[in-house]
Amino acid sequence: MYVIGIKVFGIGPLHKNQFLSPIVCIMAVALRTFASTSKIGVNKLFIHQIVKMSTADNFRIERDTFGELKVPNDRYYGAQTASFFKIGGPEERMPLPIIHAFGYLKKAAASVNQEFGLDSKLVSAISQAADEVISGKLDDHFPLVVWQTGSGTQSNMNVNEVIANRAIEILGGVLGSKSPVHPNDHVNMSQSSNDTFPTAMHVATALELNNRLLPALHYFHDELAKKSKEFNDIIKIGRTHTQDAVPLTLGQEFSGYVVQVANGIERVKSTFPRLYELAAGGTAVGTGLNTRKGFAEKIASKLSQLTNLPLVTAPNKFEALAAHDALVEVHGALNVIATSFMKIANDIRFLGSGPRCGLGELSLPENEPGSSIMPGKVNPTQCEALTMIAAQVMGNQVAVTIGGSNGHFELNVFKPLIVRNVLQSIRLLSDGAESFTKNCVIGIVANKENISKILNESLMLVTALNPHIGYDNSAKIAKTAHKNGTTLKEEAIKSGLLTAEQFNEWQFIEENPYLVRIAFSLATNQTYIQLFDQIIELVNEAIKLNRNTQEEIRSILTNNYKDDSRITRERLNLPCWYPYFKDSNGMSPGLNKEALKIKRISVDPLMDEGRRWNYLEHRLLKAAVCSSLKDEQIRMINLKKEIVINKLLAVGVETTNKQKYKLVNEVERYNKQIAKICAKSIDTFLRDYSDFSNFKGLRSIAQLRQKWCNELCHLQNKTKWTDSEDKQLLILRKKFSNWDTISEKIGNFRSPFKCFQRFIYLKKNEREPSKWKPKEDRKLLKLIKLHKVGEEIQWAKIAGYMPGRSRMSCEYRYTRTLTTKLNRGRWTDSEDLCLVEAVDKYGPRNWTKVSECVEGRSALQCRNRWVHVLDPKRRDQPWTWEELGMIITITIGGSNGHFELNVFKPLIVRNVLQSIRLLSDGAESFTKNCVIGIVANKENISKILNESLMLVTALNPHIGYDNSAKIAKTAHKNGTTLKEEAIKSGLLTAEQFNEWELIKIIND
């Protein structure tokens, strides 16, 4: 809504928010009048500055949490969008399919939120604005690039701001006022960027696949199938390893392309079940915070109606936010399609190479001139474009894979990168397939004469003679024919192994029933494949139905029999601290009576007695002990608090600070009430154990109370221990030996068992000093002499007399540092031989026995030498495909240098060394067995060179490009030489042609 502003030196119509203040207007008019009547000049800049103090021509002021920001008047986006990262140019903008998918999402969310109380007027305006986003009418209002926050928050807010401001305009409000429609409170209601952006990713990808890629693939598939049928009777030579092979039909060759595309279509469709699962409703981390019950299911259903896709809510929102395996899977299917496109396009362009010096089996449509210097040259542009598209998609696959693997904790922060590459690949493949089909496949023509000529010249037709004269004789005939430059028939008759009549009867061309059988078999196989596909689809549906039934039964059983409050008993692990407990029985070296006494006082009350507690006993104990009064008190307070919190979250701009303050005080009051109840002792809510000590299970009173206080009581404090609690625990442990007393003194609902467990943890951290002291080394050597039986050292007993040292640390200290017999130098051949013999005798497990056979070497040294060097199972094994595939991880590993250190060093060097070995061995073998023996076929090279029409390029400087092109085309059309057509044209003489000929120029 605009009003007319006072026009002062070019100031035109202004928005009503920017209307000049009366004082400024009066000053401007007065100054302008004074300037027109007075001879004294008035500085126009001064007047302009006065106006500028009140307004700016093309901007409005908007505010966000970081303050004020200028936003263009002609744009619906707001402050958050205006502060975007300026990385790259317009080509880096967020793909429009994502923006349009957001339009569907926001419209669906508004509709669902209306059911939960959102004003119908706001819903109507938001829906109208969302429709304009979907239609593309507002595309210019989305300037953000892909390179932003990894969750897509900026793009989500871009959409929120545009829809909110457009809705405000529809309702007659002021742009940027956030009233009556707020971008966060209304447009983004019950949503988070963490669940809306992945939802938009899935919706956009699904729409693009269904509306763009699949129709293009079906078009490509159908036209290839037509060509396969058209070429079914044309017999051509096969080329395995790019060498001459046995014949097949051109239709059969194209049928392979047809199946490749058909398989690509099925691969894409197979990804739909995971792609149709939406993250909407998971909000920030997947828990559904700030949504209503049923919101996720309702918004998925609404989106399904808007897009005509079978969209459903994701069964697990945590996976939907933290990982994007579905999109990685989609792009995997796209990568396979790109691989197929690369093969198909390369085959067609090589088969269409020529027109005279290549294979020339196919004639490709001429779409445009192919060279700016070689007249008459026409390039296979569609094939080349499609192969470049395939290469780009393969590159995108790497980016999508890396992006998909970077889901840390609850969120993947490579979302824009992933969806941008997926959508780009879809667009490129669909446009490429459509263009290639329209401009190439439809116009392909088979050069039957050239195909027949090449077929008859092929020496591989001798294969048909194998059943009659044997492989060796057939090979001899083929080699002789190749050497002498004669035909197979001539050499076969000369050999005396068969007559001319027999050769004609057995030859492998035209009427051979073998090819007819192949075509019939291929058609039959296709019929069976279709039938099997239908059967497999029915079986998959039955399996899916069976799986759903199993899930329902499992859910029923779980709800009926599983108790969520059941707690798994933690295993008690006693460390080596004074008085040196060694096992769960508390036994210690030398039968330490002091240790046994303390164990009976402090440990035994915390350990289970007798048999294990069963599930029924857990349920009975909880039912007998829990006070329903206390549970009901806390539950009712939590319900009241939840109502107040919802009111606090729903406050709008019209709520006063006093009302907000009142709501906050209510929440604090409820929190204090809950804290007061929880501060009471556990026993406050317990009954007399003697009343129910005789219930099923025959457990004692002590057992019942211990089980409740240490495991089952829901009042236990399971939060992180504070430093003050740790200090208090250590002090109390010195004063008291009873853990019940310590638990009561600490308070905060720390159970006796948790106090004991924490005390063990604190002592465990103290028990390993950073360095061994000389006094400890001397004591260790003395204990080794006392506890050495023969050649065996009793390390377990020794550790019991070394406070703060474990069995392993004592053994390591002696074998690595203190012993004088240990050899730390390089291993000799004799030592290796002794080690191998010892391992054969004692096996690769008993390293203590093995080390006794290798003088001067410890058990650890022997193990490391065997595992890393001598073990035959770890050496000289052939590389597996999985290992070879790891070569590509060098690139990934090299990019993972974070801050001052790359932490992928072993991975990188392992793959680098493997690559070096493979490349060196491969280069050596290729050089030795191939390069050295390569011989140039000079006659064939010269023949092909002289037949080439591109020699006309040498005439360009003399007769011009157009005239040269005309000569080349005429020569090609008439089957004559360049020289003949050049002389006929009258543009040059024979002498001039010979003088300007390209071959002569090259030789000179």
Image: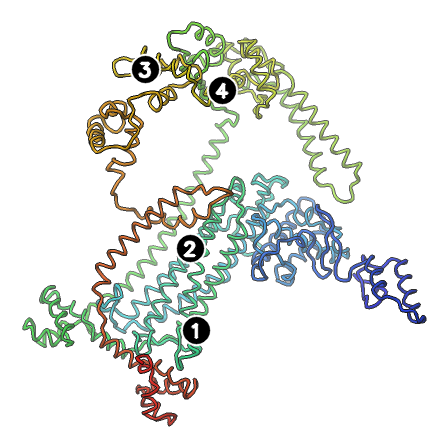
Q: Residues within 10 Å of mark 2 (few under 14, many from 20)?
A: many
The percent position of residue 543, horizontal first and vertical second, equals: 39, 45
Q: How is the image coloured?
A: rainbow
* Residue that numbered label 4 is attached to: 766
The answer to whether 353 appears left or right of 621 in the picture is left
Mark 3 vs mark 2: in front: 3
Contact between labelled residues 2 and 4, with CB atoms less than 8 Å apart: no
Residue shown at the point (80%, 40%) measured from the top left: 656
Element at label 1: helix
In the picture, the disc for residue 461 is none
The answer to whether 490 appears left or right of 215 in the picture is left
Element at label 4: helix
Which of the two labelled residues, at mark 2 and mark 1, occupies the earlier sequence position? 2
Which of the two labelled residues, at mark 4 and mark 2, occupies the earlier sequence position? 2
Structural distance between the alpha carbons of marks 1 and 3: 84 Å
Residue 7 visible to an observer of this rendering: no
In the picture, the disc for residue 439 is 1
Element at label 3: loop
Residue shown at the point (77%, 34%) measured from the top left: 661
Which of the two labelled residues, at mark 3 and mark 4, occupies the earlier sequence position? 4
- Front residue of this view, candidates 654 and 945: 945
Which of the two labelled residues, at mark 1 and mark 3, occupies the earlier sequence position? 1
Q: Residues within 10 Å of mark 1 (few under 14, many from 20)?
A: some
In the picture, the disc for residue 794 is 3
Structural distance between the alpha carbons of marks 4 and 2: 55 Å
* Residue that numbered label 2 is attached to: 333
